[in-house]
Amino acid sequence: MNSLAHGKNTSAIEVTNISTHGIWLLVRDKEVFISYEDFPWFKGQTVESIINVEEQGHHHFYWPDIDVDLTLESIENPDRFPLKAKPI
């Protein structure tokens, strides 16, 4: 008897880990780290709020429960985007 092959992953984005230092996000075949130091809005949020992420456009992500949107470029290169809102 043969097992059925696994289906394709239909999600282009997935939170793979939440640690005390930040969040690991899988974007297609690439994993990126979102540190709380660079993106303080995520610190102290619930797991449900963090994993509720949507891809709004190509490499543009939105967390509706937190009202945060980021691009892949800003995640990978936070120093290029020095103007940041302060967490409430």
Image: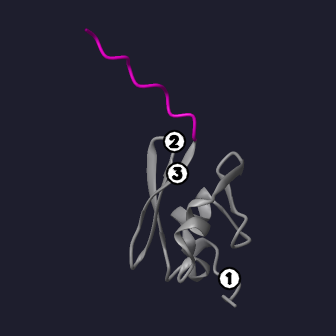
User: Which quadrant of the structure image shows residue 79?
Assistant: bottom right
- Is 32 magenta? The answer is no
Q: Tag 2: Cα neighbours inside 10 Å, few (<14), some, or many (≥20)?
A: few
x, y percent for residue 44: 54, 83
Which mark, residue 28?
2
- The three-letter code of the residue at mark 1 reads Lys
Q: Earlier in the sequence, mark 2 or mark 1?
A: 2
The residue at which mark 1 appears reads as 84
Left or right of 65 on screen, residue 32: left
Q: Earlier in the sequence, mark 2 or mark 3?
A: 3
Extent of the magenta region: 1-11
Q: Nearer the viewer, residue 24 or 38?
A: 24
The residue at which mark 3 appears reads as 14
What residue is drawn where x is 49% and y is 27%?
A: 8
Would you say residue 9 sits in the magenta stretch?
yes
Q: Is residue 2 left or right of residue 73?
A: left
As helix, strand or loop, the secondary structure at mark 2 comes to loop
